Image (cartoon, rainbow, N blue to C red):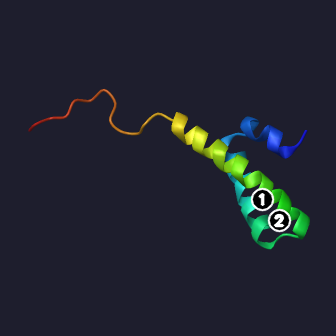
Amino acid sequence: MAIIDIIPQLDDKELANLRANAVRLADSGAPKQKADAAELLPAIEAELADRLAKRPAKGRRGKKDSLH
């Protein structure tokens, strides 16, 4: 199975680690590594954006603002 196929199955820590490695390889890897990273990064970024959009908004829940 290709790495790009397992991206949705990774937990947040694994996904962050994969992104960090892909960024590093895109900058300083061998030509094949740079090409692989360039292919993976958009899929990683899309997954991160999707997860962020699905998270509940942070803030006060169930509390009423006080006027005093």
Q: Residue at x 59, y 39 (%)?
A: 51
Front one among 22 and 62: 22
Question: Residue 40: x percent and y percent?
Answer: 77, 52
Q: Secondary structure under badge 2?
A: helix
Residue under label 2: 34
Indicate left or right for 40 with 66 as reference: right
Q: Quadrant of the image for the C terminus? A: top left
Q: How many neighbours does mark 2 have within 10 angstroms: few (below 14), some (14-19), or many (20 or more)?
A: some
Q: Amino acid at mark 2?
A: Lys
Query: What amino acid is found at the position of numbered circle 1 in the picture?
Result: Ala
Towards the viewer: 47 or 35: 35
* Residue 27 or residue 58, whichever sits in front: 27
The answer to whether the residue labelled 1 contacts the one labelled 2, judged by CB atoms less than 8 Å apart, is yes
Marking on residue 38:
1
Give how far across and how far down residue 54 sits, in percent.
54, 34
Quarter holding residue 61: top left
Q: Secondary structure at mark 1?
A: helix
Q: Position of residue 14 (x, y in %)?
A: 73, 46
